[in-house]
Amino acid sequence: MALVGCGSGVPSASVSNEDLSRRVDTSDGWIRSRTGIGARRVSGPGEPLTALATQAAAAALAHAGWRAEDLDLILLATSSPDDLFGTAPLVQGQLGAVNAVAFDLTAACSGFLFALITAGQYIAAGSVRRALVIGADQLSRWVDWDDRGTCVLFGDGAGAVAVEACAPEATGLLGFRMRSDGSRNACLTLAQTDEQQPLLDGLTSQRGGFAAIQMNGQEVYKFAVREVPAILAELLESTGTAPAELDWLLLHQANQRILDAVAERFAVPRERVLSNLAAYGNTSAATIPLMLDEAVRDGRVQPGQLLGSSGFGAGLSWGAALLRWSGPGAATSPEA
Ligand code: ACO
């Protein structure tokens, strides 16, 4: 599969660290030095996830030069759907992608990478020719804005990548690894509330609803700086790729110190590590495509370049993929 288009969508309202310090006991200095985050975007009541995801998807379609009717598959990675039954069909409807099947995939901050790999499998199997992979989250709905340990980290956004079948030698997915470890789930949760409702005599049912994000930040930090270099090292070894061959590290944007630790492990210079944490914070499933879109549009990422990518987060889940950006108009032909 070739990566041939990208797009993004973010809410207009930006909340700075100074703004947050008027609500919780924090400071710009603390947040920047511990995380690298300077601001985050926050959706208002009239800005559902569907709108952000559709904006990103439409931009990726336009970038690739495709019509919505050309799509066979839309995968939406999200942990904050507008509708628990699925938000991807809403995006499909708004795009007018009448020939596509659309469904959600949930794997927190690993979601986009897992969805991209999943799309790659459909394409490799020959059952899909053109797909849109979207990562979109609005964790602003699910943070406790009075918990300074979590509310400073997250922001809202969406990014999308258009992928299509191509000749094997032109593939943009050169290798991947995926992992999860549910025994460490409690480190980071957005869990059901334990609220019950009487139904009939002797019968009580659970009422739906979710509690705010709970996180053991230090455990998540240790997990990320241990597992991300390990899985990337495995991927590089299995694909016979030297770290020096990577044009870019495209990692999930959770914390600048995590990005720095991974870069140091592979001796990748700082200027080849993509980061937009300062403007957006952690947008969960959206970080990787949002970052890619920015770097493609400002000319940093060029057609033919290699990107070492890793997503990691709640689940716990983590993964890595070796990607090659093709860009719009790349000569492609159906996979064998
Ligand atoms: N402002 C000021 N002080 C704060 C804040 C804040 N926003 N938050 C915590 N503190 C205080 C703590 O209360 C603590 O004070 P104490 O020493 O008096 O008890 C002190 O700062 C140090 O707290 P730590 O938790 O040890 O701070 P740490 O250096 O570990 O940084 C952080 C915390 C930024 C959360 C870090 O652990 C981290 O980034 N972890 C990874 C989190 C992450 O990436 N999560 C998302 C994963 S992706 C997904 O799937 C959603």
Image: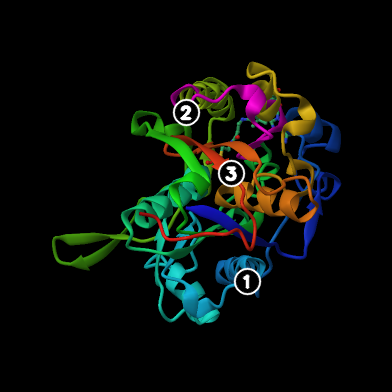
> In the drawing, what numbered circle is on residue 208?
none
Ligand 1 picture quarter: top right
Measured as percent of width and height from the top left, residue 127 is found at 32, 62
Q: Amino acid at mark 3?
A: Arg
Q: CA distance from mark 1 to mark 3?
A: 19 Å
Query: Around disc 2, counting alpha carbons within 10 Å, would you say few (fewer than 14), some (14 to 19), or many (20 or more)?
Result: few
What residue does disc 2 label?
239
Residue named by callout 1: 65
Q: Which residue is more in the foreground, 21 or 195? A: 21
Q: Is residue 246 magenta?
A: yes
The boundaries of the magenta stretch are 237-257
**Left or right of 192 in this view: 200:** left
Q: Which residue is mark 3?
A: 324
Q: How many numbered markers are drawn? A: 3
> Disc 2 marks which amino acid?
Thr
- Circle nearer the N terminus (3, 2): 2
